[in-house]
Amino acid sequence: MDGPLLLIDRSLGRGVVAQLIDGLRRGILDGALRAGDPVPSTRALAGELGIARSSVVAAYEQLAGEGYLELRQGATTRVAALDALGALTRDPANDAARRGATGVTGEVPLAAIDLSPGVPSTARLDERAWRAAWRSVGTSPPPSTSPPPFGLPELRVAIAQHLRHARGVACSPDDVVVTAGTSEALALTGLGLRTVAGGSPRIGVEDPGYPGGRRALQLHGAELVPLPLAAGGLDVAALADTDALAGTDALAGTGGLDAVMVTPSHQYPLGGRLPVAERLALLEWARASGAIVVEDDYDSEFRHTGAPLPALASLDAGERVVLVGSFSKVLTPWLRLGYLVLPRHPGLRDAVTAARTDLDSPVAGPVQLAMARLLTSGTLRRHIAATRREYRHRRGLVLDALAPLQHVGARLRALEGGLHAVLELPDADAEARLVARLEAEGIVVAPLALYAVASGSGSGAGRPAGIVIGYAGVGDLALSTALDRIATLTRAVLAAATGGPEFSTPAIAVGTEGRSPG
Amino acid sequence: MDGPLLLIDRSLGRGVVAQLIDGLRRGILDGALRAGDPVPSTRALAGELGIARSSVVAAYEQLAGEGYLELRQGATTRVAALDALGALTRDPANDAARRGATGVTGEVPLAAIDLSPGVPSTARLDERAWRAAWRSVGTSPPPSTSPPPFGLPELRVAIAQHLRHARGVACSPDDVVVTAGTSEALALTGLGLRTVAGGSPRIGVEDPGYPGGRRALQLHGAELVPLPLAAGGLDVAALADTDALAGTDALAGTGGLDAVMVTPSHQYPLGGRLPVAERLALLEWARASGAIVVEDDYDSEFRHTGAPLPALASLDAGERVVLVGSFSKVLTPWLRLGYLVLPRHPGLRDAVTAARTDLDSPVAGPVQLAMARLLTSGTLRRHIAATRREYRHRRGLVLDALAPLQHVGARLRALEGGLHAVLELPDADAEARLVARLEAEGIVVAPLALYAVASGSGSGAGRPAGIVIGYAGVGDLALSTALDRIATLTRAVLAAATGGPEFSTPAIAVGTEGRSPG
């Protein structure tokens, strides 16, 4: 291990642990430390550097959590052999060097780094609590009946408590419906709205917005009406202005909306938080027009800048906002577990109750029991706190790597919370070329084209263009590798497109107050 | 313990164990043995009766499995204190005596015996294997992604294998879609049929038939057409005869059917098995008319009389039959786990694939892993074998108690397989009165009215009348108690209705070849 990597400078005003982590991480990324290399024992390194052994332990643990080191009980700690490093071999210039660095010889299969949005990290999950939750599920033979249509009482109580703490929503367990993830929650809402509307409901959706949510509503009979966005999310003024809406094809010559589906806490995918004044205006519009508001609160537990706003549902006092949430982002979509919080609105409530009773709950009893245990034991709360720190750190990596691209006309957005960032590009052509070049290097991102409502509108002129980058589900090393390639290829694509000069419009500011220290 | 209960008569030609079981069971049912009473040790009783101790052990174990005795490692074996006995206190004449017999003093809350159909027994489940299956689910942290839309490969392989063995269906794992029970399987089928039909599909359904299945299809856009039944289930000749169908309201002036939903292995709820000739005619009709056949194979693993026929899907060679199955009857609806087997039919297959991909699987990964383990370890196969014996025994209790009612005009049906029986009554009026009187005594059964398609047709004249009795999910003691009351009240209701004379039409014969020896 080379000296320069690990010089600890106490005059820097940075903690010893942070310096140690930075030095080791840089050594691995630079190839000075190779996959499989042993690192010194904590005792030896502490003695060598003249620092406390606990500092070395803390640094190793952090780096293991980030995926750089392999830490095993009773075995030598080593530099991790990450498949993701294989992606580096796609750059011919680096090929030989990187192969050496990763210890791979001969032909290497294309290793993908998947930055698809919506993939959380489960690496820090408390394995003991997870194991205990599932073990407890099997301790007695199962009942002979289906779980109740709205879910097991203990889980509904735990979810109501979680929402009170995490989202400021004062709901009763009676308002909670346990669902098989967000899709099933929206399907059920769609079935309920069809009954309320007495036919195919007309539902306004943000454009761009969550394509899976739109498809779930459409498959269950809804007619979708795209709604324009403003700076903080939905353009509420345009919503209230029927003339503006009548100008769109979808509304030509027809009546009002039965419902709108919104992401006020963190517009999906572009980012932005709906200000309080707009929230009140939205609720006022809904009250006046008789519409239901479906609030998709998909990742609000993770707020990186500024104070989180309570859910829109908390302003509504249970009158006409349906809150849709899930455990897909805060834990994992592997469980297919989510929930609805129903407002008092009697028509909708009766219709959802009838549909759910007719169909039975799709959520297995053991899954409900295990999640109730993870909630009441505090495991999920601690997991959210731990992953929030992890995601803030990764968000810092994204900012470091991609914020400088504003000088070539690519803007970072959506970083105020959640698990993804948007790199906005000047046009759909640049988007398509960047996505194709990344794909050729084994790096998967989502083009913004996927989120636009009117996907058939020719060249996509007028819609926001860019890529959506999920930064939560991969280790730091894979993320850094991919971000490096994204930065390089974005410069190449934009240089080819514009001949090199910078964009003339000002870049959108990205706050950095949420940066993690690491 | 009184002598007469336990006289073993070797000249009877019945086994010692069977006589012992009968004697003890009768003693408990008659109140000679009371809840909480200790029974003699196996050694003492064997000595007293001059039989092998292993015979006493076998008898005690059988009675414990049936719910009569409480058998605990290292503790005295006692007569079980069954809540179900409380239901007896509803008969004022028996009140004091039964309270004494159950050891209950003072006011007793109404204890219901729930004979709702569709509730299996989980009492004999291999607890060790169940525990191991869930423990294995928690051994590693969960993935960060949803399970694949059609299910985990290991479960799809295991289901295909199960179907080959249990139902004679030679399908590939690629044809299997893991679903959240039958309702979700039918919902998905309904969405697929809507795409194939290019609008609301017209689906023929058996009348009477499975109401939950009808509602799942209707909620997902289907228009239902009731189809008449013949002796073995669906009246296929009437189906092919468009004139006959045109006579019904639903088909007046409209075109053909896009699909039919059938229960050929065991018509639900009336019983009967569609003969092979009718099956071939049904497939021929479907081929000629371009319709899809949805086979609801809900309880075919349990056949009590005659050889089981392979699933209809096995005759079709994967062309146009969708097989719908679930683990609700063979294990428990608590898991909300079922499956579809898709035919090659490209339009339907593409449509189901698209809908499932859009919505994501609703089935949690851990549930899929646990079920794959229960299937591949043979646990489910052994459980089916054990519960089949248990259900045959209970079916025998139903026959003993209710077959004599044919002399007063009530006919037993549907006993050739499955988990339920139908006691057919002369008219809807007798049905309503019997259900009300049973309910007043805390005994829950399902009236046949629930199964009729046209529930709004006034007095229900013309439809089959009677009650559906689920005999699988309760212990022998509760079942015997309830059957006794059903027999008594049926006689009372029919005597009041007809002035006492027997029905003139011949009763439908019920085979007894499937009787269990116990």
Image (cartoon, coloured by chain):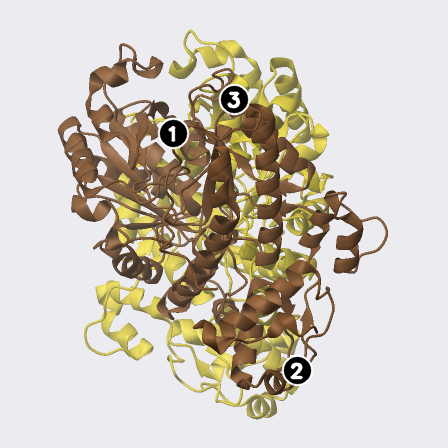
Chain colours: A brown, B yellow
Residue A32, how many percent across, how many down? 71, 64
**Separation of marks 2 and 1 at Cα, in angstroms:** 82 Å
Task: Determine which residue is flagged by label 2.
Answer: A41
Residue A454, how many percent across, how many down? 44, 21
The quarter of the picture where the N terminus of chain B appears is bottom left
Q: Is residue B477 above or below residue B442?
A: below
Q: Secondary structure at mark 3?
A: helix
Task: Answer left or right for A230 relative to B29.
Answer: left
Residue at the spot 40% in from the left edge and 80% down from the top edge:
B33
Task: Answer left or right for A311 relative to B329.
Answer: left
Q: Is residue B265 above or below residue B138?
A: above
Task: Determine which residue is flagged by label 3.
Answer: B195
Q: Amino acid at mark 2?
A: Ser
The quarter of the picture where the C terminus of chain B appears is bottom right
Q: Earlier in the sequence, mark 3 or mark 1?
A: 3
Indicate the chain on which mark 1 is placed: B
Taking the image as drawn, is residue B152 in sight? Answer: yes
- Badge nearest the viewer, 3 or 1: 3
- Badge nearest the viewer, 3 or 2: 2
Taking the image as drawn, is residue B136 in sight? Answer: no
User: Which image quarter: residue A347?
Assistant: top left
Query: In the rendering, which numbered label is found on residue B222?
Result: none
Q: Amino acid at mark 1?
A: Arg
Q: Secondary structure at mark 2?
A: loop
Number of numbered discs overlaid on the protein picture: 3
| Front in this rendered view, residue B152 or B43 | B152
**Separation of marks 3 and 1 at Cα, in angstroms:** 34 Å
Task: Determine which residue is flagged by label 1.
Answer: B463
